[in-house]
Image (cartoon, helix red, strand yellow):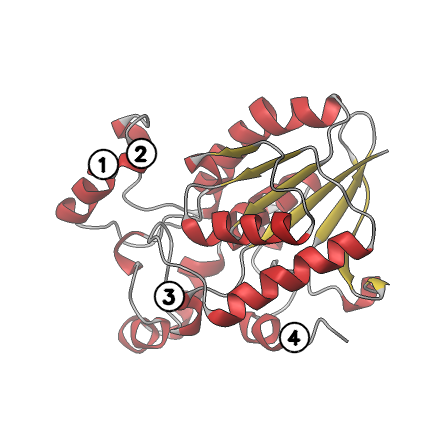
């Protein structure tokens, strides 16, 4: 049996300010640092060890991973970074306050942009796209691959390419893997692993900084999955796999 751990980054500054983040490279809040340290302590307490780590090129996911590995005394393991594990690109919504966007476009439209599988938010303007293209983080990325906006399925496509090319080979070599990424990137991977249909992903959520463990067979098919807290596995009925966003943000995962 193989074990894989997913971690969504700790609370970011834009999470705190209730803004659409996407590819905006914002840092963690003080609480986000604490959440990452707690996640690392939990994984260490339950005997987890990793051989390799994967993350995006966005600092909130990278820093969350650094903190976790520091807590586990595993800062020496290889860390691979890829834009393919970036958060979903929210186009013209990036940086905007979610309540203000809801007031302008209506709750139903914003919910559709945020939670549907195949609908893209409005595209970013050309000037902002040029800033992405000139960012050294994306110097090796083809111009056609740097998006103006993405649906969840767009995000899934690029994340799955990385999954199949980089992560699956590590798992097949029996390497113990941790992935520190973002809510929508991890939603896409969970959707794939659990064979969740497009219309079933609307209420699928991944809370911040809670270790999500997948046990996999030799064919990299899920046997089981569970979240972890200090006491151990969080009971299946407590796992917030299908909740409204406000419920996820207010969920007391510490029990």
Label 1 to label 2: alpha-carbon separation: 7 Å
Q: Position of residue 190 (x, y in %)?
A: 65, 45
Q: Considering the numbered disc 2 on the image, is that residue within a helix, a strand or a loop?
A: helix
Q: Are marks 3 and 2 in contact (CB under 8 Å)?
A: no
Position of 132 with respect to 112 (left or right) is left
Q: Position of residue 23 (x, y in %)?
A: 35, 49
Q: Which mark is residue 138?
A: 2
- Whichever of labels 3 and 2 marks the residue nearer the N terminus, that label is 3
Q: Residues within 10 Å of mark 2 (few under 14, many from 20)?
A: some
Q: Which residue is mark 4?
A: 251
Foreground mark, 4 or 3? 4
Q: Residue at x 76, y 44 (%)?
A: 214
Label 4 to label 3: alpha-carbon separation: 25 Å
**Nearer to me, 28 or 179:** 28
Q: Residue at x 54, y 61 (%)?
A: 10
- Whichever of labels 4 and 3 marks the residue nearer the N terminus, that label is 3
């Amino acid at each position: 049996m193989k074990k894989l751990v997913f971690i969504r980054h700790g609370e970011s500054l834009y999470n705190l300010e209730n803004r659409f983040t996407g590819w905006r490279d914002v840092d963690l809040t003080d609480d986000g640092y604490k959440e990452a340290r707690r996640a690392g302590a939990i994984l260490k307490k339950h005997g987890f060890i990793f051989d390799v780590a994967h993350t995006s090129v966005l600092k909130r996911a990278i820093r969350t991973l650094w903190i976790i590995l520091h807590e586990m005394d595993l800062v020496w393991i290889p860390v691979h970074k890829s834009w393919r594990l970036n958060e979903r690109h929210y186009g013209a919504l990036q940086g905007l306050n979610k309540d203000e966007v809801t007031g302008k476009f209506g709750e139903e439209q914003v919910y559709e942009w945020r939670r549907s599988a195949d609908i893209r938010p409005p595209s970013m303007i050309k000037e902002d796209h040029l800033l992405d293209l000139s960012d050294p983080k994306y110097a090796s990325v083809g111009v056609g691959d740097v998006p103006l906006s993405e649906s969840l399925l767009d995000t899934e496509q690029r994340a799955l390419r990385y999954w199949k090319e980089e992560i699956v080979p590590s798992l097949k070599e029996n390497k113990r893997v941790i992935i520190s990424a973002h809510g929508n990137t991890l939603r896409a991977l969970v959707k794939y692993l659990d064979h969740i249909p497009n219309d079933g992903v609307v209420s699928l959520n991944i809370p911040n900084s809670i270790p999500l463990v997948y046990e996999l067979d030799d064919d990299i098919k899920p046997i089981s999955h569970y979240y972890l807290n200090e006491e151990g596995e969080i009971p299946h009925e407590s796992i917030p796999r299908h909740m409204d966003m406000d419920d996820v943000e207010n969920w007391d995962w510490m029990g």
